[in-house]
């Protein structure tokens, strides 16, 4: 099973995207205060890069650290895995949970913007170990911690070469 390799490849795509990192890190004070504003420092290459990545992008669904500050986080993790007739191929579902504090989301609908960015990245990046990527379902999660709500999207990563 190469699931750790596949998850690492997804993490590399997410952590290399400045737009996603800004959406996860910078808070907007109003609709005119965009996290993508060029006046805000880049996260990639900054001294805080790894601290931001480790706090905002997780391999497990967790709310640890939500009591300290209002933030946004994406958690992605393996879901159902099914074999195919050819024993070298598998179909792997991976779930992406976007968790956002309500005070951040209420300003600029951040939870949806982050979900859309992840969808864009998954559909437009080339993954060496995946075939077709298909969005299966998207659902609200509801309150996951005090003041935090989530949106979950399940993707199917087709035809994984699993040798």
Image: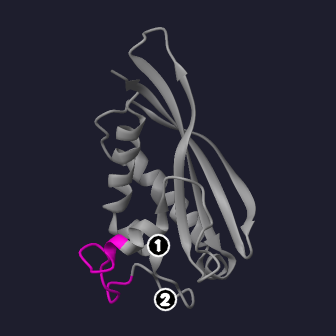
* 130 vs 33: above or below: above
Residue 80 appears at what percent x and percent y?
59, 32
On whether residue 10 falls in the magenta region, the answer is no
Q: Secondary structure at mark 2?
A: loop
Q: Is residue 153 left or right of residue 114?
A: right
Asked if residue 38 is among those painted magenta in the image, a careful observer would answer yes
Relative to 101, residue 116 above or below = above
Q: Which residues are magenta?
A: 37-50
Secondary-structure class at tag 1: helix
Mark with earlier residue (2, 1): 1
Residue at 55% x, 22% y is 82
Residue at image mark 2? 33
> Which secondary structure dominates the residues rendered in magenta?
loop
Label 2 and label 1: CA atoms lie apart by: 12 Å
Q: Is residue 87 left or right of residue 75?
A: left
Q: Nearer the viewer, residue 94 or 132?
A: 94
Which of 28 and 25 lies nearest the eye of the viewer?
25
Q: Is residue 39 above or below residue 25?
A: below
Q: Nearer the viewer, residue 129 or 122?
A: 129
Give the residue displayed 42% in from the left and 47% down from the top. Answer: 122
Residue 147 drawn at (x, y percent): 73, 76
Nearer the observer, disc 2 or disc 1? 1
Labels 2 and 1 touching (C-beta < 8 A): no
**Which quarter shows the C terminus?**
top left
Residue that numbered label 1 is attached to: 23
Please tell me in which quadrant of the rendered image residue 79 appears: top right
Which residue is depicted at the point 51% across and 84% down?
Answer: 27
* Crowding near the residue tagged with mark 2, few <14, some 14–19, many ≥20 C-alpha atoms within 10 Å: few
Image position, residue 161 (x, y; %): 35, 23
Q: Badge 1, how many Cα within 10 Å: few under 14, some, many 20+?
A: many
């Amino acid at each position: 099973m190469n699931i750790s390799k596949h998850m690492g490849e997804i993490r590399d795509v997410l952590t290399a995207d400045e737009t996603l990192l800004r959406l996860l890190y910078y808070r907007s004070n109003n609709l005119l205060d965009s996290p993508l504003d060029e006046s805000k420092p880049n996260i990639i290459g900054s001294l805080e890069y790894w601290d931001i990545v480790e706090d905002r992008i997780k391999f497990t669904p967790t709310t640890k650290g939500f009591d300290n500050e209002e933030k946004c986080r994406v958690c992605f993790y393996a879901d159902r895995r099914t074999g195919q007739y050819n024993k070298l191929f598998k179909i792997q579902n991976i779930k992406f949970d976007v968790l956002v504090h309500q005070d951040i989301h209420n300003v600029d609908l951040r939870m949806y913007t982050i979900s859309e960015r992840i969808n864009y990245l998954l559909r437009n990046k080339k993954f060496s170990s995946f075939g077709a990527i298909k969005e299966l379902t998207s659902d609200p999660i509801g309150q996951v911690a005090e003041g935090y709500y989530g949106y979950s999207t399940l993707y199917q990563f087709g035809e994984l070469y699993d040798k």
